[in-house]
Amino acid sequence: MSRTALGMPAVRPVHGQGNLHAETAFPAAAKTEMGNTQMRANIRHATHTIRGKRANVVKELPDWQALRSAGSALKESVMANLPELLEQFEANVTARGGTVHWARDAAEANRIITNLVQATGSTEAIKIKSMATAEIDLERHLAEHGIIATETDLAELIVQLGHDRSSHILVPAIHKNRHEIREIFLREMTETDETLTSEPRDLAEAARAHLREKFLSTKVAISGANFGVAETGTLTVVESEGNGRMCLTLPETLITVMGIEKLVPTFADLEVYLQLLPRSSTGERMNPYTSMWTGVTPGDGPQDVHVVLLDNGRSAVLSDPAGRSALHCIRCSACLNVCPVYEQAGGHAYGSTYPGPIGAILSPQLTGITSAENASLPYASTLCGACYDVCPVKINIPEILVHLRDEDVRTKHGQRPTADAVPTEDGATAALQTPAGPQATAENTDGGRSTGSASGPAPGRVRRLFQRLPHPPSEMDLMMKGASMVMSSGRRMALAEKALPLGRAVAGHDRRISWLPGMAGGWTDVRDIPAPPRESFRNWWAQHADETQDRVRADGVVPGTGPGQPAGPRQSEEDDR
Amino acid sequence: MRIALFATCIVDAMYPRVALATVRVLERLGHEVVFPPGQGCCSQMHVNSGYLQDALPVVRNHVKAFSAADYDVAVAPSGSCVASLGHQQPMVARAGGDEDLARRAEAVAGTTYELSQLLVDVLGVSDAAEQLGSWFPHTVTYHPSCHGMRLLRLGDRQKDLVRSVAGVEFTELPDAEECCGFGGTFSFKNPDVSAAMAEEKIGNITATGAQVCTGGDASCLMHLGGAISRTGAGVATVHFAEILASTRQNPLEVTGPVELSIPGPTGRRHRTQAAAGSAAGSASSDAPAAVAADSGESR
């Protein structure tokens, strides 16, 4: 039998929409955020505390590295078999009386959920803290359709009442301290008065009273999911407060939004992740509440159960072998808590629902690197590697950051088509085939917070066309090109280094350079450069290589006569990665 | 042993004294040091800035320079650059479609050690005072640079060597494992965050009361030293190779204006003075370092 190669499908997976965009480039956004010294102090205190707790509970497990490897390997197998696992999951949920919905992007997910809530006749919903619903900007969409969704996670409630944005994956109100939280409660909760103190216990009690009424009266709950088990159709929510458990058990209708990457193959695989997740996120051996449900249990809990499987750019991430392990993320936020950049800049500087190191690789991949200012995110790291060390599923974040920087540079140089501008037969672009239509995509590029509502398509198209043109070389391009030329030859290095005395002249009498023009001014804005040496080592060595005896004698130590002869070499330490 | 020195571009051009200190320590142990003349840079600046294509000729050059040279092992006074050889060069070569170059890069990386790795793991140095005659009568704290710590897993090698130097009074740095904020081009692409990170690090350094902060990467030390210079915190940043090289007869001075030149004009008459590499942050070259000057003139 002869076979004809048909090639790969021409349609690229669509990129994500919603709260995934940095509208201001990271350096500028960080500068603004860093002006808030209270916020920085709050974040510093909180991250250092969680960091210490995590380190202590991780230290207890002798097989932590093996667990990380297992967590990583399992997610790799999930990504390799995603279509089959998703279908298996759907079949099992359906068999147990649940309903599965497939949402290609944020607009589709929002539409599905809104329809489901409207079908119940309710205009209210209670919410479990969920990154997926924040990503698709669900609350805003529901509000536009007259549905009020109340956050029940304490920190999310603080953010919601404060008309604020989350700044952390696990602790969304990490940027607020308890005095600021008291102010918000006093202002927004009608049942509180001046007697409310800023003691954590009092604040929690106020929130509890505020929410209890909601739990008992609301008929619809909306949740995310930490894991979905393909083998059984079971969904899992891991939490600390028990408010999630209330949402999962009391209402009549339960709608769960789950990113398609959240699957695990078998129930037994949860063993790995339920050890990794709490220790990595809250620094607890086990979280207080782990809820699991499989479809509908007649007469017990919600009788109308839905799962919305959300793509929103995940397939696009999956299509890049060098970046796809970002989908392994289990949203523990350990990488945020150890990141020195996050610690200084805070979560809002990243613009997206996903802040910190994981956000810096996930957001630009979900949206495409050309979207809004997301190309600035992969540069928001010193590549110190602390994130990789603590990641419970071993996502090599520094390596993916470098990969995305390369993608950004090549895209700007026109060496790579922008993923959301792939020509198709009719001359349109693949991205224009999204169900939301061209308007949503154009709006996405412009501002990010797509709701699928119509706006004029023309500016977006023009901009998109412009983005496809190669950029003229930047100052950085020229510097890199020049450095590449010089640094790829010892002879050219030696020649270039002859100019060092020039730098000495610039440094002048106090032997330091305190101002440089252009891009290098970023250095001298905050640091001096010492006066360069008169001569490079290379050029010095050319004259002095053979003076070994003099050097040794000047130091006053004669080889071979020292008291301690070298002992045997020591064994290299095991790499614990 | 015949040891090839990979100076690294920043040490070659800005911190020649660190390269010289590396040479002095190895020669003192009786090894021959050679400098493959074709060497340039490890390519890390290009790779970490996303310029993989421009990195390729730099990688090609490094592999060629070190494949052509005759040596037993190679050494560099930098954790970051050594890590780049193994972690990045093969990747750059493969991204450029050159599998042969990738293999050769792996081979070169396989025989290139960071200085403390070479001293401790290969040459069996565990006591710098005893085995190297190192003497440095100052209060010292130590910042472990990220790539040495997390990519090479150097552990306490650098710190233990410094602690074993005679005269060193060592103080631990709080939150030592936190990045100093250098990050290559990050330092000027995100200057505000970078400066805030440096400020935090410098706060921890000054809290130790140490006169000197040492480390294994000249780049991080340049960043910290530059920020200290701006704030006037009065702590010297010194590469640990220079502390190991410092002896009673030829001590490293750490006071006075920063002078990065190898001391003395490059004439033979002043050769031993030149060899007496006092350090970044040391006295000016016009003030010959200690005993070195008198022992040298007549040779």
Image (spheres, rainbow, N blue to C red):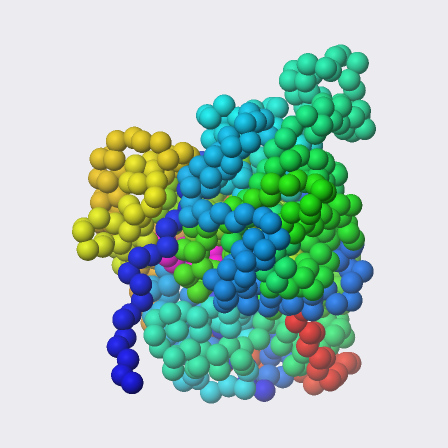
Residue at (66%, 40%) from the top-left corner? A302
Q: In this picture, is B162 found above or below A341?
A: below
Q: Main secondary structure of the magenta part?
A: helix
Q: Is residue A199 left or right of residue A35?
A: right
x and y percent of residue A513 in the render? Answer: 45, 45
* Residue A303 makes an appearance in the image: yes
Q: Which of the 4 quarters of the picture holds residue A221?
A: top right
Magenta span has A353? no
Camera-nearest residue between B140 and A21: A21
Up/down of A144 relative to A512, above or below: above
Magenta-drawn segment = A399-408
Taking depth in this image into account, of B267 and A59 the one nearest to the observer is A59
- Count of labels shown? 0
Q: At 76% from the left edge and 48% from the top edge, which residue is drawn?
A: A287
Q: Position of residue A543 (x, y in %)?
A: 43, 74
Quadrant where the image shows the N terminus of chain A: bottom left
Residue B217 shows up from this direction:
no
The extreme front residue here reads A298
- Quadrant occupied by the C terminus of chain A: bottom right
Task: State the residue lying farthest toward the left.
Answer: A426
Q: Residue lying furthest top in this view?
A: A194
Q: Position of residue B119 (x, y in %)?
A: 65, 76
Which one is nearer the viewer's eye here, A273 or A515?
Answer: A273
The x, y position of residue A265, in whole percent, is 60, 64
Q: Residue at x 45, y 64 (%)?
A: A322
Residue A414 lies left or right of residue A103; in this view the side is left
Q: Residue at x 31, y 63 (%)?
A: A9
Which of A527 and A162 lies nearest the eye of the viewer? Answer: A162
